[in-house]
Image (tube, rainbow, N blue to C red):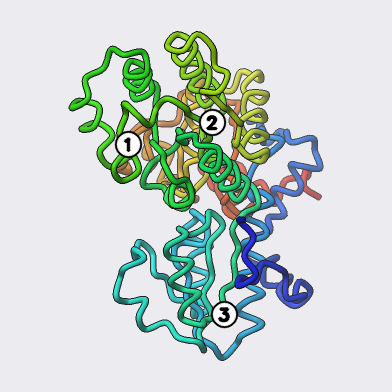
Amino acid sequence: MVRDPGLIRRSFGLQKEIEPTLQSQYHSELIEAIKRNEYHIVFGEYEVFLAREFGFCYGVDRAVNLAYETRRQFPNRRIIITHEIIHNPRVNQNLKDMGVEFMTGAAPDDSRWDAVGANDVVLLPAFGASAELTERLKATGATIVDTTCGSVMNVWRRVQTYQREGYTAIIHGKHSHEETIATKSRAGKYIVVLDMRQVDMLCDYIEGRGGREAFLREFEERCSPGFDPDADLKKVGIANQTTMLSSESLAIAGRVQQSIEHRYGSAEGHFRRFDTICSATQDRQDAMQEMLKRDLDLMLVVGGFNSSNTAHLLEIALQSCPAYHIYDATCIESLTRIQHSPLNSKQAAHTEDWFPSGARKIGFTAGASTPNSITGNCIKRTLELLGVTPIESAHLR
Ligand code: SF4
């Protein structure tokens, strides 16, 4: 079972009390104005387009609210969070400013957990915590407030079902991403695949073509302890990290199914699939595809550099126009220099002459963990550099 009676998952009923703080930190008048104007607004010679779905998703909204309520509910108790609450540096900093202590990256056997006691409050983030860590924290007697998104728990249920029915979970995701760490800790036998290259290797093995040593080397850190590809790939079930590119996850499921059919003549009894991309991720990817039909000259995608769903929005945007993944307005240093996170790179980069000459149609979207205040500031910053002051524009009165 995923639901755990030892964890608090409900609101403390303090929404009214925290609302003014949330409004002042995360609301944007400019964003609201553009939304009221059908997500498109003209500023002088420039057109700004906003994706119809962007920014905070239901899971992030709930996690942030619950974290703020927790601070309010326990004003005098030490509050610790096991990892970033969401992948947004501003939101995490705001929680630090409220006295929340971050234990980012601490494994379940980290000795720092020894200092957690019954008088402490522990927050579990939106993408969850591993089963081992959750058990260890429960044993401390601390009050545990669980902000794990329901869509993530849905993936846990799926892999637990696979385990019960004797299937190995093939998880499409980033093996070191917190959500995937939490998912695989509940999966029994699993293997995590990142991309089609790894899936091809997996499928070759299923079809009897791959070498065992090379396979184990490739997936050394990506499969359950003692994984035996000869025994553990006979019955497989697909799941995915909720924020992956949905088209890729679908293609991966199709490719594995083909291999299983090739090997066993039928998928029956050997293959299960279930799309666990969350609806918020899907909606943001669909909205991005829709917006790209407007022949944009440039696209700015706003989100934390470690945000997986934001990186996938960039990937979609780059299919149609120049696009940059930035985390806030300070990344837009000038019209000739931008700091950004290039696709498939772990390092932030600076690019010169990034603003396309003659660009007039500029699109904006934001990952599921980006507050509107940050996206609004990115729009303002861009327009100010272009000589437009949006707040004073008649369009916004
Ligand atoms: S992106 Fe999806 S899974 Fe992640 S918090 Fe938002 S709704 Fe939940």
Which residue is label 3 attached to? 143
335 relative to 320 in the view: left or right: left
Q: Residue 98: x and y, percent? A: 53, 78
Q: Nearer the viewer, mark 1 or mark 2?
A: 1
Residue 60 in which image quadrant: bottom right
Amino acid on which disc 3 is placed:
Thr
Question: Looking at the image, which residue is at 47% across and 77% down?
Answer: 139
Residue type beneath disc 1: Ser
Image height check: is 192 above or below 315? below
Residue at the spot 48% in from the left edge and 66% down from the top edge: 134
User: Does mark 1 have its CB less than 8 Å from ligand 1?
Assistant: no
Find numbered disc 3 in the image and state the secondary structure of the residue it sits on.
strand
Q: Which residue is located at x 59 percent, y 30 percent? A: 362
Q: Which mark is residue 345?
A: 1
Front label number (3 vs 2)? 3
Separation of residues labelled 1 and 3 (CA atoms):
38 Å
The local crowd at label 1, few if under 14, some if 14 to 19, many if 20 or more residues have their Cα within 10 Å, is: few
**Residue farthest to the left, as pictured:** 213
Q: Around disc 3, counting alpha carbons within 10 Å, would you say few (fewer than 14), some (14 to 19), or many (20 or more)?
A: some
Residue named by callout 2: 299
Tally the marks: 3
